[in-house]
Structure formats: structure tokens, C-alpha cells
Image (cartoon, helix red, strand yellow):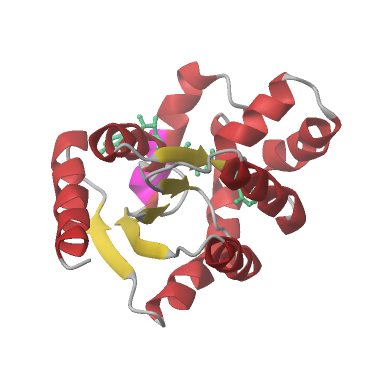
Amino acid sequence: MFNIILYGPPGSGKGTQSEKLIEAYGLIHLSTGDILRREIAAATPLGLEAKSLMDKGNLVPDAVVVGMISSALDNNPHAKGFLFDGFPRTEAQSVALDQLLADKNTEIGVVLALDVCQKELVKRLLHRGLTSGRPDDVNENIISNRIVEYQTKTMVVANYYSKFDKVVHVKGEGTVETIFESLRSEIDKRLSIK
Ligand code: B4P
């Protein structure tokens, strides 16, 4: 099993690149943002709790997202590997994920970190906001709050995995195809030494 974390600030291209990576490597895509938005659309109690936080650009509680990921892992016992997109977003989520994977005798193979400057992030998200229908994409103050949440709570995730020599930085600016090729080359390097 080969498991990947696609890591980066809001708007760095995680969702975009995930679509291509799961197709290329036959991985199961686990996007906590997508799972939460499905819960919101279905108006479940979890979705209602998450909506008020997400609409403001705040993270939802660790226990909620860890529970969602735990169920998703249990529901896919024959997966070749998982692509985690937008998870983990705090150190507590990272520790919980490592434990969940260890319980299944597997681990994270690589953390691919997409580097994109803040000006470009805001531009992309506002542009997506024109059509996405996502309340967290339309307002520049909410986008700024998402970036602050990333800086204060999520940047530690890269430090955490750096201790295990698992983080690779990839330039997240340029065409979608060029970035995909860079990600692919980093994954293939790791797969060849497995
Ligand atoms: P997410 O759904 O993870 O949203 P995101 O950070 O905006 O990234 P996304 O993957 O959607 O965007 P992408 O960069 O691909 O999270 C939303 C919210 O859910 C969070 O704020 C939080 O409240 C909550 N949440 C989710 N997971 C959580 C967790 N683990 N813990 C707590 N809370 C959690 O793309 C952005 C735009 O850029 C797109 O329009 C795309 O077309 C464009 N783009 C991509 N690549 C490009 C390129 N190379 N050039 C130009 N544009 C590009």
C-alpha cells in the first residue's frame, strides 16, 4: 500500500491535482473538504455543525474529521493506497492518522507540499468563487481567515512529517499539467525505492 498526503494552503491546487493523481495511481481519494460538503448538502447534524465553521473559514474540530477518515479507511479494506487531500490539517490530526494507518500495518509514503504565493491563492479562490457556490470562496476576508488558519494550525503538519523525512516541496504555480508531472516524478522516485 502506498499512501500520499497532498498538502498546501487553501487554493494551492490540492483538489485539482488529486483528481489526476488518483486516476494515475489507482488510489482512493479522501478529501475531508468534499466529505464535509456532502454532509452539509445532506443537512446531517455533522454537516450543520461544520457549515457554520466552514462558512467563516475556520477549521472544524479534530474529532469530527478524524472520525470521518477512520470510517473511510474501514470502508475501503482492499485499497491499493489512499490520497489524503486537505487532511491532516493540525498536528493532532497527523498523530491520529499515523495511528490509524499503523493499526492497518501501513504508513504515509510521502507528503507532497504545494508551494504557492499568497497573492495567487487569493486570486484563484476568488475566481473559483464566481462559479463554485462555496460561501468560503466569495469573500476576501474569509479567504484571508482560511490562510491564517493554515499558517497558525496547519503549517505544523509539514514540520511534523519533516521529522520523518517524508516532505517534498513542489512548485504549485504554473500549468496544471506541469505541476502534475512534478508530483508524478516525486511519487515515482519514492515508489522505485520501496
Ligand atoms: P478544502 O475543501 O480542503 O478546500 P481548499 O483548501 O480550498 O482546497 P481545494 O482543494 O478545494 O482547492 P484547490 O487548491 O484545488 O477545505 C475547505 C474547508 O473545509 C476548510 O476551510 C475547513 O473549514 C474545512 N476542512 C476541510 N478539511 C479539514 C480538516 N482536515 N480539518 C478541519 N477542517 C477541515 O483549487 C483552488 C482553485 O485554484 C480552483 O479554482 C482551481 O481551478 C484553481 N487552480 C488549481 N491549480 C491551478 C493552477 N495550477 N493554476 C491556476 N489555477 C489553479
> Is 25 in the magenta?
no
Residue 13: image quadrant is: top left
Q: Can residue 121 be seen at all in this image of the molecule? A: yes
**Which residue is at 42% across, 63% downward?**
108
Is residue 104 placed above or below 24 in the rendered structure? Answer: below
Q: Is residue 95 left or right of residue 125?
A: right
**Which residue is at 68% across, 40% downward?**
54
Measuring from the top left, give residue 65's x and y in whole percent: 68, 49
Q: Nearer the viewer, residue 173 or 96?
A: 96
Measuring from the top left, give residue 10's x and y in whole percent: 47, 46
Q: Nearer the viewer, residue 122 or 39?
A: 39
The prevailing secondary structure element of the residues shown in magenta is: helix
**Which residue is at 43% across, 47% downward?**
82
Q: Nearer the viewer, residue 159 or 74?
A: 74
Is residue 131 placed above or below 54 in the rendered structure? Answer: above
**Which residue is at 60% across, 58% downward?**
149
Which image quarter is the C terminus in?
bottom left
Measuring from the top left, give residue 51's x and y in whole percent: 75, 34
From which residue to which does the magenta span run? 119-124
Q: Can residue 58 be seen at all in this image of the molecule? A: no
Q: Is residue 151 left or right of residue 186?
A: right
